[in-house]
């Protein structure tokens, strides 16, 4: 289009994305986040390097994480409108304005993908690439470093785009009923069959292109990305209204069961939101998978069979953060002030809802880990204590730092750094024991069990200290 409408809408989409993040996380804090990401990823890559991890493994893990990030970004943009509305209020993104803008839906869809790709490639993937390459390969040979950073940045951006395209195509097919679901199952089955038959599928993705820039891998990467976006453009309708839902009035029955109106509302919000309680389980399942991979990885490095109870218990306790995030996702703090509720009562309700949901979800996956991996009964008992203690600790720390807005961690450099230090200091010693000591002696188990109790008490203490602090802030705002 020669009249500049496409360029104008693209610029406004970039501005819209920046305003969205600035409003949520504070402009000055958010602007420093790329620097922090570079240092954080570089530090993690250096730690993996000095512990004997092959650079190829580091790069493979990085591509996998960026693919998941692309999947997640696409899901927020296209199916997380209810969550965005809760956070931002009644807003309409340019992506969903095809009926009022002089551009077609497919043009807006393409602009949205290009905008997200450019935005996240510059702000996040570039510092990630720079930090990783400097940590793994060092700063010697500026030309080689620049070439490697450029290659890694390009393939990470392609992996991010592939993730977004996969989400769009999947949502488009899922919205076409049974025929669409059948069509969606076909490529999944093909990928599964190829993997079972020994085909190295990742060789034909952007990660394979990072390893070897052959014409075949260039072609398969382009074909994969082009295929998912063509499929998405043909099936996805961004302007389709959400299907009507009918729910029974359940608040009074749930209130009588839980005895707290805020806890009841928080749990009902999750139940009635997109994904329901399944998304809480999904978050814990992802952490469960990561823990299993870490335990296997630690076993290969140390040559010692890690303790299932200690390692899984300590890490699965971190699921308390995502659980609290889901419990506050639907909240607009100002709405509580219109009700005859004190800030203290709101926090008390959130704490009760967390206790009803958070440790229970973590313990469910912990039980699954014990059934799968086994382990001594004493270590299993101590691991359960650690899980509950870590969950309460991460809850109290999160509430103390962010109140009812745990999303502020995402891009607030200072808060994220403080939170990271608060998690690393008590958990690293526990994980070292869980990963590298076998069998764990009785005295050490007693210390670990006591640590779990102390962490839980500290978490509850932080929560109680945070209530007056946030009461004052919310009342003054």
Image (tube, rainbow, N blue to C red):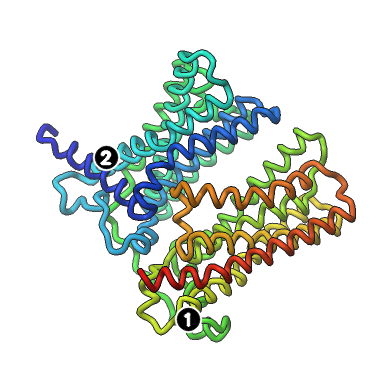
Q: Position of residue 384 (x, y in %)?
A: 75, 61
Relative to 285, residue 202 above or below: above
Q: Is residue 275 above or below residue 153?
A: below
Label 2 residue SS = helix
Task: State the image quarter where residue 40 is shown.
Answer: top right
Considering depth in this image, is 14 or 366 the residue closer to the camera?
14
Give the residue number, with chain letter if any, for mark 1.
Answer: 250
Q: Where does the N terminus fall, quadrant-wise?
A: top left
Q: Residue at x 70, y 30 (%)?
A: 51
Horizontally, residue 242 falls left or right of residue 187, namely: left
Between 67 and 353, which is closer to the camera in this rendering? 353
Q: Residue at x 43, y 54 (%)?
A: 178
Task: Please report whichever mark, 2 or 1, sits nearer to the chain's N-terminal start.
Answer: 2
Camera sees residue 194: no
Residue 474 in the image, given as x and y percentages of width and height: 40, 70
Residue 195, given in percent of the width and then of the height, sits at 60, 33
Q: Is residue 141 left or right of residue 4?
A: right
Label 1 residue SS: loop
**Crowd tier of the residue under label 2, counting other residues whose Cα lies within 10 Å: few below 14, some 14–19, many 20 or above:** many
Quadrant of the image containing the C terminus: bottom left
Q: Residue furthest left?
A: 3
User: For this rendering, which residue is in front, 271 or 232?
Assistant: 271
Number of the label disc, if any, that sits on residue 111 = 2
Query: On the rendered structure, is 334 left or right of 440?
Result: left
Q: How many marks?
A: 2
Indicate the quadrant where residue 333 lies. bottom left
Q: Find the distance from the CA under tag 2 to the CA under tag 1.
A: 42 Å
Q: Residues within 10 Å of mark 1 (few under 14, many from 20)?
A: few
- State the image coordinates of residue 4 (x, y, percent, origin top left): 13, 36
What's the residue at 38%, 81% (across, down)?
339
Q: Is residue 412 visible?
A: yes
């Amino acid at each position: 289009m020669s009249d500049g409408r496409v360029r104008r809408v693209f610029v406004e989409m970039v501005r819209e994305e920046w305003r969205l993040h600035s409003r949520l996380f504070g402009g000055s804090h958010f602007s420093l986040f790329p620097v922090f990401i570079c240092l954080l990823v570089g530090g993690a890559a250096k730690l993996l390097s000095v512990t004997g991890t092959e650079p190829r493994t580091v790069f493979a893990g990085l591509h996998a994480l960026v693919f998941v990030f692309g999947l997640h970004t696409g899901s927020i943009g296209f199916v997380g409108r209810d969550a965005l509305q809760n956070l931002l209020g009644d807003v309409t993104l340019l992506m969903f304005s095809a009926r009022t803008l002089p551009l077609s839906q497919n043009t807006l869809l393409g602009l949205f993908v290009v905008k997200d790709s450019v935005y996240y490639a510059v702000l996040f993937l570039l510092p990630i690439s720079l930090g990783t390459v400097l940590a793994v390969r060092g700063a010697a040979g500026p030309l080689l470093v620049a070439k490697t950073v450029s290659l890694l940045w390009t393939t990470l951006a392609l992996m991010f785009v592939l993730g977004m395209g996969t989400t769009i195509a999947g949502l488009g097919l899922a919205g076409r009923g049974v025929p669409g679901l059948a069509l969606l199952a076909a490529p999944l089955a093909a990928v599964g069959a190829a993997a079972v038959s020994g085909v190295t599928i990742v060789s034909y993705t952007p990660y394979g292109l990072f390893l070897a820039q052959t014409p075949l891998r260039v072609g398969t990467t382009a074909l994969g990305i082009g295929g998912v976006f063509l499929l998405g453009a043909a099936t996805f309708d961004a302007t389709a209204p959400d299907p009507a839902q009918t729910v029974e009035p359940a608040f009074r029955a749930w209130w009588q069961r839980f005895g707290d109106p805020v806890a009841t509302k928080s749990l009902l919000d999750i139940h009635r939101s997109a994904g329901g309680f399944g998304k809480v389980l999904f978050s814990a399942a992802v952490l469960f998978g990561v823990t299993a991979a870490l335990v296997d990885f630690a076993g290969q490095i140390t040559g010692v069979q890690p303790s299932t109870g200690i390692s899984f218990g300590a890490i699965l306790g971190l699921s308390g953060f995502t659980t609290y995030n889901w419990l506050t996702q639907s909240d607009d703090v100002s709405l509580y002030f219109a009700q005859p509720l004190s800030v203290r009562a709101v926090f008390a309700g959130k704490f009760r809802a967390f206790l009803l949901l958070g440790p229970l979800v973590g313990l469910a996956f912990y039980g699954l880990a014990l059934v799968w991996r086994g382990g001594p009964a004493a270590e299993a008992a101590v691991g359960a204590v650690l899980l509950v203690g870590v969950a309460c600790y991460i809850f109290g720390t999160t509430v103390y730092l962010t109140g009812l807005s745990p999303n502020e961690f995402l891009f607030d450099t200072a808060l994220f750094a403080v939170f990271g230090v608060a998690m690393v200091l008590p958990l690293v010693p526990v994980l070292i024991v869980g990963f590298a000591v076998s069998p764990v002696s009785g005295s050490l188990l007693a210390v670990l069990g006591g640590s779990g109790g102390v962490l839980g008490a500290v978490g509850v203490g932080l929560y109680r200290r945070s209530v007056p602090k946030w009461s004052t802030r919310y009342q003054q705002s």
